Amino acid sequence: MHTDHEIAEAVDDGLSDDRAARIRADVALVQELAYYGFEGPVYEVFRDGMLRETEPILRGMLRDGSLGRLAIARFNERGIKFWMESEDLAALRADAAARDEILIDMQVSALKRFRVNALIKEKWNPNHGGPRGASCLRSYFVGTCIWEFRRAYLKWVEARIKWAKLHALRDFGEETPGGAGGILGLLRAPGYLAEPESMVFTTNFEDILAEQTSQTQAVIGLTVRGFVDTEIADTLKITHGAVRSCKTRFRKALYQAAREQRIWIPEQLHTKANHDKQQAGAA
């Protein structure tokens, strides 16, 4: 299939060793992984290494648009309608953060499917006899990511649409009655601004996150991308309690930074618990 050829070529271009040598190494590796049931430390080392090797390949394919094009071709071949808007393609070419958001979502889902299909169900065939012969495990994983791209892309698009509605430019204009909607409405809300002329922010969300442990950074990074606690715990191989502790620790760090006047947290963004406490105190 044409899409499989392009995937194999992209992986071959991104890796320095010979494909035949990779396949021979993969055969021995799968036998070792099967001995441990495709889990545990040995599998995690293999998984992490595969992610490191394929990440720059996938990132490049997202940037040049080839990943989206291959995904469209694959889904349309199977009668599943899928297309991408030109402005979305332009956004992915220009915005590294957008590419990373889709990349992480895509990889997390693809890892689960890859483990089951390629390894446990033995769908990866090192003796495949197609026109280009067999593909290595890295090519199989990149192909799995392409299958997961449609879901990750549509999720990203939905978030962009919600953001655009919230931050509609008309909310800044006179045509909005009283300027009550969107950002302007929030800026004019009672208690949102406190002495705005004297406010100076020396840091932001990303700076405070960078001060945290690597585990907390990973938990918060997945959280802001929409993953729930269970998915985060499974991905990072930690307990649900550890996930909650990381979130609590980061929340405390944010409020400490607010007390130190490094950042400012608007009243509308305070937790419900704090709001209820303030209401009770006022009463």
Image (tube, rainbow, N blue to C red):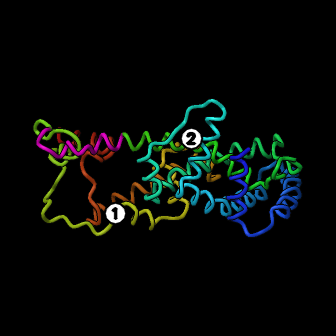
Residue at 28% from the left image edge and 39% from the top image edge: 276
Q: Residue furthest top?
A: 79
Q: In the picture shown, does residue 52 fall above or below 158?
A: below
Disc 1, SS:
loop
Residue at the disc numbered 2: 150
What is the number of callouts on the image?
Answer: 2
Q: Nearer the viewer, residue 141 or 226?
A: 141
Q: Amino acid at mark 1?
A: Asn
Secondary structure, magenta segment, majority class: helix
Q: Are marks 1 and 2 in contact (CB under 8 Å)?
A: no
Q: Nearer the viewer, residue 31 or 283?
A: 31
- The label shown at residue 204 is 1
Q: CA distance from mark 1 to mark 2?
A: 32 Å
Residue 164, image x and y in percent?
32, 43
Q: Amino acid at mark 2?
A: Arg
Quarter of the picture holding the N terminus: top right
Residue 165, image x and y in percent?
30, 39
Disc 2, SS:
helix
The magenta stretch is: 162-175
**Residue 169 in magenta stretch:** yes
**Residue 194 in magenta stretch:** no
Q: Nearer the viewer, residue 53 or 132?
A: 132
Residue at 81% from the left image edge and 52% from the top image edge: 132
Residue 239 visible in the shown view: no
- Front: mark 1 or 2: 2
Mark 1 crowdedness (10 Å alpha carbons): few <14, some 14-19, many ≥20: few
Residue 115, image x and y in percent?
74, 46
Q: Which of the marked residues, 1 or 2, is nearer the chain's N terminus?
A: 2
Q: In the picture shown, does residue 248 fall above or below 73?
A: below
